[in-house]
């Protein structure tokens, strides 16, 4: 499993600056280290995309090549072409916007779960799609934190947790 997508219904229009602030607060609360990367702006200098790194704080002192439990998070400001999707198997006719895309979930499941739980606590209307026909809600993530091995939560159907 390579990526996770944090989805919100289209036209929700949460400003990217607020998303980044909420990511910062979620990382602080979860004791995760946040590293800022590239930013892309439009012709009017409005931020449209930002790339961030999130690391388990106890891993921060390891050498760069030894680092584990780190993820890359791409944050998008709506609207952005090609960042919309329908979840056909849900058969609800809703269109979702990819607000956040998390790369490198495999072998970084613990930091992914920790971050997603603390972030979705601020945005419970969002859901997480994990490249299967599974969508995780805030309550699913809470169950995963309490009941599962934190390294295999995303390989389990949330309905069976």
Image: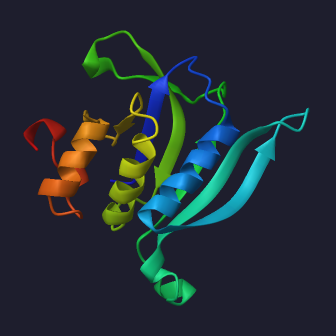
Instruction: From this view, report whether residue 152 is shown above or below residue 44.
Output: below
User: Does residue 57 show up?
Assistant: yes
Q: Residue at image x 57%, y 63%?
A: 53
On screen, residue 111 above or below 3: below
Residue 84 vs residue 149, the one in the foreground: 149
Q: Quadrant of residue 42?
A: top right
Along the horizontal axis of the image, is 91 left or right of 156? right
Q: Position of residue 18 (x, y in %)?
A: 64, 39
Residue toward you, 20 or 89: 20
Q: Residue at x 49, y 70 (%)?
A: 55
Task: Let me know if residue 132 appears in the view.
Answer: no
Nearer-the-camera pick, 114 or 100: 114
Q: Quadrant of the C terminus?
A: top left
Most extreme residue toward the top is 93
Which residue is most to the left?
160
Q: Horizontal and vertical percent for residue 133?
A: 25, 33
- The tally of labels here is 0
The answer to whether residue 156 is left or right of residue 52 is left
Specify how the rendered protein is coloured.
Answer: rainbow
Residue 146: image quadrant is: bottom left
* Residue at position x 33%, y 55% in the image: 113
Q: Is residue 88 left or right of residue 151?
A: right
Residue 126 position, x and y percent, is: 42, 31
Furthest toward the right, the residue is 44
Q: Quadrant of residue 88?
A: top left
* Vertical arrangement, residue 93 with respect to residue 36, above or below: above
Q: Is residue 108 above or below residue 97?
A: below
């Amino acid at each position: 499993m390579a990526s996770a997508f944090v989805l919100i219904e289209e036209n929700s229009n949460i400003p990217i600056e607020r998303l980044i602030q909420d990511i910062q607060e979620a990382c602080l609360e979860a004791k995760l280290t946040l590293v800022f990367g590239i930013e892309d702006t439009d012709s009017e200098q409005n931020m449209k995309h930002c790339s961030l790194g999130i690391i388990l704080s106890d891993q921060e002192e390891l050498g760069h090549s030894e680092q584990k439990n780190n993820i890359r998070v791409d944050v998008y400001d709506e609207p952005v072409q090609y960042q919309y999707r329908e979840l056909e198997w849900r058969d609800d006719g809703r269109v979702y916007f990819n607000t956040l895309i998390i790369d490198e979930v495999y072998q970084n499941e613990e930091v992914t779960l920790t971050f997603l739980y603390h972030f979705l606590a601020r945005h419970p209307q969002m859901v997480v799609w994990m490249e299967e026909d599974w969508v995780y809600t805030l309550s699913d993530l809470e169950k995963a934190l309490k009941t599962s091995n934190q390294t295999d939560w995303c390989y389990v159907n949330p309905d069976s947790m």
